[in-house]
């Protein structure tokens, strides 16, 4: 029932993340109990936390908001002591930025050589005619602005403004919707 609530009120990505985090927790509890899981207790959460490596403690933090929502919706299955435990304990979040700081070759940023290769392949594909103008421009917008795909999906024709500069050259301004602002619709706040 709580996943239905997320399906109706949150993004597909959030629903998916809650499903997999909740599934991981329930599988752990079922293995500990040797059977079916009818409710999640504070003891279950303590045992789950103890089973995690320090670097994986964020897995409990990731499922905590789902369990709190479950309890708040008054759906049976999460005990009061489980919520009490979650409110008392300080949980680590997922470590952010490590791939960038360590220049991880798999999940970190592109190196200068890789970036140059991407630029050359993009320009070469457009010059050869294997990439149309719309895809070429969109790829360069991603490279230059680093916006989220949803921000580009929300763009309208009126968000691209061409104006004449003092030196006679054309200047293009792209007005991008900001999407991570709380309590706003997606086009309430725009950024040049």
Image (spheres, rainbow, N blue to C red):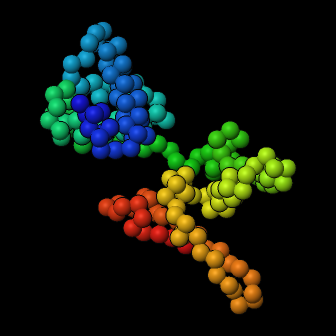
Is 120 left, or right, of 172 in this rendering?
right
Q: Relative to 135, does residue 104 appear above or below in the rendering?
A: above
* Quarter-of-image position of residue 24: top left
Q: Relative to 187, does residue 59 appear above or below in the rendering?
A: above
Give the residue displayed 79% in from the left and 46% down from the top: 130
Is 16 left, or right, of 166 in this rendering?
left
* Quarter-of-image position of residue 49: top left
Give the residue displayed 36% in from the left and 19% down from the top: 27
Query: Which residue ends up furthest to the bottom in the rendered image?
Result: 166
Q: Position of residue 190 (x, y in %)?
A: 47, 69
Is 55 left, or right, of 183 in this rendering?
right
Count of residue discs: 0
Q: Position of residue 180 (x, y in %)?
A: 43, 58
* Quarter-of-image position of residue 167: bottom right
The quadrant of the rendering that contains the C terminus is: bottom right
Is 99 left, or right, of 75 in this rendering?
right
Give the residue displayed 79% in from the left and 53% down from the top: 126
* Residue 79 showing in the rendered view: no
Q: Position of residue 15 (x, y in %)?
A: 37, 37
* Residue 95 showing in the rendered view: yes
Q: Relative to 60, does residue 140 appear above or below in the rendering?
A: below
């Amino acid at each position: 029932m709580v996943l239905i609530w997320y399906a109706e009120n949150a993004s597909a990505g959030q629903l998916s993340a809650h499903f997999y985090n909740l599934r991981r927790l329930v599988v752990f509890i079922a293995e500990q109990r040797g059977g079916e899981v009818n409710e999640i207790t504070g003891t279950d959460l303590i045992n789950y936390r103890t089973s995690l490596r320090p670097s994986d403690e964020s897995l409990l933090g990731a499922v905590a908001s789902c369990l709190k929502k479950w309890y708040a919706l008054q759906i049976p299955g999460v005990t009061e002591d489980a919520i009490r435990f979650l409110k008392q304990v300080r949980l680590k979040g997922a470590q952010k930025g490590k791939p960038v700081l360590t220049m991880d070759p798999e999940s970190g940023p592109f190196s200068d050589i890789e970036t140059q290769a991407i630029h050359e392949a993009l320009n070469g594909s457009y010059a050869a005619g294997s990439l149309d103008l719309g895809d070429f421009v969109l790829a360069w917008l991603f490279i230059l602005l680093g916006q989220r795909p949803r921000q580009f999906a929300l763009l309208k024709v009126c968000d691209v403004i061409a104006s004449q500069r003092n030196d006679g050259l054309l200047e293009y301004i792209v007005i991008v919707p900001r999407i991570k602002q709380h309590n706003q619709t997606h086009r309430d706040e725009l950024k040049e």
